[in-house]
Amino acid sequence: MARPRIVIAGASGVVGHHLVAAARQRFDVTVLTRRVTGTEPNGASPASWQPDAARSGDEEALSRLTSTLEGAAALVNLAGSSLAAGRLGPAHLDRLLTSRVDSATTLVTALQRCRRPPEVMVQASATGYYGQRGDDVLDEEAGPDEDFVLAPVASATEAAAAPAAARSRLCVLRTGVVLAEDASAWQRLLMPIRLGFGGPLGPGTQWLSWIDADDLARVYLHAIEDHSCDGTYNAVAPEPVRQRDLGRAAARRLHRPFWFPAPAWALRLALGRLADGALLQSARVVPSRLSAQGFTFRWGTLEGALDKLLPSPGRADGAP
């Protein structure tokens, strides 16, 4: 008997690799790629697509994509330009916005042409939607902060995916900082600590909403497999932390100091608006809807996540 099939766009990043590794245990996985190169995630079958096909009016590409989506159990959209690939100047911000809106629009256009559309579309979004909110506790009912540099990107991406709800169940996952050994955000956070120059970023009091990469893959599978899932979810661990507390806990495990603060002005000088978008944002986001549905995080506490990422000497693995 054939296994159900899921289609993932944007599987080349950390989230995609962790999701493919988890999904291939129970699904046949097709990953959409601009060019089939043989470097696609293990256990997945590649299929070519053009993320801007809807905007450019490329009917051949749309027809090919429609055939790929036909009869799939699920469509997952992770596609978009990298946040870390620039300083969030006008050109970089435009790439982020255009790449995300194009990919969502093209996928929805193809989905709407299917005779048997995917049962569910899961669209990636980000906690950047909530912007700079200080100590406010933010569940899924909180509105966007349109003055924040990344909020319009998240809002536009979600709006581009919204028409899929007419044909498929639609879930939108607003994700925080993803923690994994192969995650660039985690590697960048650890680098100064490992070198002995770790310290608070800006005030250090900003709230950081995070999630372990394997837990995030489980959230995606939950959205795919639980037919009661619908609408927007905060895909974050239930215990957001202040940036200085995360850094201090990592430094303690690495036996490194943590007393060299990086002032906000210096971060902005070095990184431009990316400093505000990625390092200085304070958003205390909680996964209210996932918790209400009984989803259990395996690495839902900071200590549990660090046990996995920075296990104590002599520990064979990071399992809780």
Image (cartoon, rainbow, N blue to C red):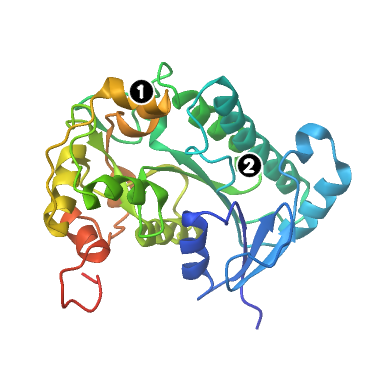
Left or right side of 238 for 231: right
Residue 44 lies left or right of residue 266; in this view the side is right
At x 58%, y 36%, the residue is 162
Depth check, front residue: 193 or 56: 193
Q: Residues within 10 Å of mark 1 (few under 14, many from 20)?
A: some
Q: Which residue bears the numbered disc 2?
A: 164
**Residue at 60% over, 38% down:** 161
Looking at the rendered structure, the kind of residue marked 2 is: Ala
Q: Which of 3 and 98 is in front in this view?
A: 98
Location of the N terminus (image quadrant): bottom right
For image coordinates 18% across by 32% down, the residue present is 261
Spatial separation of the CA atoms under disc 2 and disc 1? 38 Å
Can you tell which quarter of the image residue 145 is in? top left
User: Looking at the rendering, in which quadrant would you find the C terminus?
Assistant: bottom left
Dot 1 corresponds to which residue? 268
What's under tag 1, amino acid-wise?
Arg
Residue 267 placed where, x, y %? 32, 27
Would you place residue 175 above or below residue 223 in this image?
A: above
Disc on the earlier residue, 2 or 1: 2
Estimate how packed mark 2 is, as few (under 14), some (14 to 19) or many (20 or more) residues with alpha carbons within 10 Å. Answer: many
Residue 81 place in picture, x, y as percent = 58, 40
